[in-house]
């Protein structure tokens, strides 16, 4: 029986992964080793009981008593905190879903790879902050990384049977987010509620706002470079409001392979879960005659400064990805709290990169995970200071 762990089980990706497991027979078809979640211990306990997990881990130690109570009599081990999550990642499993949002998902993914597991990677920050390290770790232990982001799953699928040397360009599609049709001058006053009104996708709060600011796509641009090993100038972004083409790969003979599908993350999750086979998935089938029209437009870098910053990070590499991601997360926290405006998130990130400029250069061959984690901490501190200054000037 195939063994499975899910890190970030109570988030959007985790929920949909559990849905697919249950549809495929649940605990009768899979041995679930570990489930980890955030503060929603009620849901975590429900999942653990339904899938008969060996261990359930919540992120906060303060939630552990409730988790233990909800799992009482089940025989399922309960634990809490970063060390417990790390210990859960040390438990061997054949297939591991990495969907913890943010830099917190980095260490568990690394630990899972050390067991030669297949890592289904939905935590894009892992590649953004430590791409070369992660890929080297997988190679060292004979592990495999499968992309779960819809864009990178689409690219992966479009590359099946192809030589990466024949690739001329990779085109990431972007919905443009909730504010894509707003006048540029109005974006500065956009509220959290307005940024959360995504027209196509049902996602978590943070990723939905990252979609509106295009920081999500900026991370994906960097991730594409790291995962597929292409040059920065081979990665393009185009606005595609319908979100039906998830990405495209252009080849040197002029052919473009486009991956299409309904905007449902269960497609890319299911592809990674069943790879190299294709299983029946409960996703909508496209009716092209009803769709009739697909539209595209180039992204406005004034509207989406995150894309420009991503280019700078790719050119710099080293520890710049760690600083970029950390600053982005802190800036988002301040926007959610009402401290800074929507467009000021990019301002904070840019100022952090400038402030740490002298400390970002690092030979990739000499970088360590500890270096990445140290830069993550430093950038968060600096981003908090800069966000405070920006907020005070509003």
Image (spheres, rainbow, N blue to C red):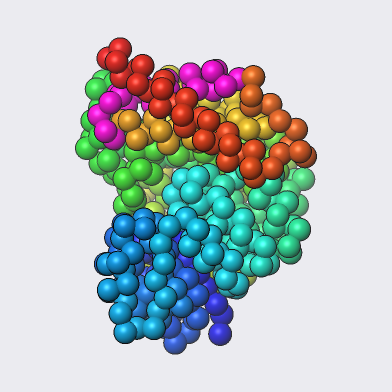
Residue 72 at least partly seen: yes
Q: Where is residue 95 in the image (x, y as percent from the top left)?
A: 57, 69
Q: Is residue 183 above or below residue 14?
A: above
Quadrant location of residue 205?
Answer: top left
Which residue appears at 56% of the width and 85% of the height? 1
Q: In this view, does 366 lie to the left or right of 267?
A: right
Q: Is residue 259 above or below residue 323?
A: below
Q: Where is residue 285 in the image (x, y as percent from the top left)?
A: 39, 64
Residue 21 at least partly seen: no
Which residue appears at 44% of the width and 49% of the height? 101
Outermost residue toward the top?
A: 393
Which residue appears at 50% of the width and 45% of the height? 103
Judged by its main secondary structure, the magenta piece is: helix
Along the line of sight, which residue is nearer the eye, 103 or 343?
A: 103
Quadrant location of residue 223?
Answer: top right
Along the line of sight, which residue is nearer the eye, 272 or 356?
A: 356
Q: Give the range drawn in magenta.
A: 336-357
Q: Where is residue 183 in the image (x, y as percent from the top left)?
A: 28, 21
């Amino acid at each position: 029986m195939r063994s499975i762990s899910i890190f970030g089980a109570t988030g959007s990706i985790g929920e949909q992964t559990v849905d697919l497991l249950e549809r495929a027979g649940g605990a009768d078809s899979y041995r679930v080793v570990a489930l980890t979640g955030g503060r929603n211990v009620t849901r975590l306990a429900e999942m653990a009981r339904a899938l008969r997990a060996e261990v359930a881990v919540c992120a906060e130690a303060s939630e552990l008593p409730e988790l233990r109570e909800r799992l009482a009599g089940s025989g399922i081990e309960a634990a809490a905190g970063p060390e417990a999550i790390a210990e859960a990642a040390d438990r061997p499993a054949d297939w591991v879903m990495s969907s913890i949002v943010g830099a917190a998902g980095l260490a568990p993914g690394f630990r899972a790879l050390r067991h030669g597991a297949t890592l289904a990677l939905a935590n894009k920050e892992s590649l953004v902050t430590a791409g070369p390290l992660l890929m080297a770790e997988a190679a060292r232990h004979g592990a495999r990384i499968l992309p779960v982001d819809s864009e990178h799953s689409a690219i992966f699928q479009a590359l099946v049977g192809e030589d990466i040397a024949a690739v001329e360009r990779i085109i990431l599609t972007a919905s443009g987010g909730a504010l894509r049709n707003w006048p540029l001058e109005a974006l500065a006053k956009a509220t959290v509620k307005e940024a959360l009104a995504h027209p196509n996708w049902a996602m978590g709060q943070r990723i939905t706002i990252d979609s509106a600011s295009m920081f999500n796509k900026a991370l994906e641009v960097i991730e594409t470079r790291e995962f597929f090993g292409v040059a920065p100038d081979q990665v393009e972004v185009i606005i595609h409001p319908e979100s039906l083409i998830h990405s495209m790969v252009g080849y040197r003979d002029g052919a473009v392979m486009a991956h299409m599908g309904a905007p449902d993350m269960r497609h890319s999750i299911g592809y990674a879960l069943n790879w190299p086979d294709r299983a029946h998935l409960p996703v909508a089938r496209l009716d092209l005659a009803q769709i009739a029209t697909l539209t595209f437009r180039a992204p406005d870098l004034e509207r989406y400064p995150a894309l420009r910053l991503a280019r700078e990070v790719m050119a710099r590499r080293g520890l710049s990805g760690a600083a970029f991601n950390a600053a982005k997360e802190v800036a988002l926290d301040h926007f959610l709290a009402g401290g800074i405006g929507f467009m000021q998130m990019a301002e904070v990130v840019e100022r952090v990169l400038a402030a740490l400029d002298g400390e970002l250069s690092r030979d990739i061959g000499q970088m360590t995970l500890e270096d990445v984690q140290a830069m993550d901490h430093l950038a968060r501190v600096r981003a908090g200071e800069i966000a405070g200054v920006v907020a005070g000037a509003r």
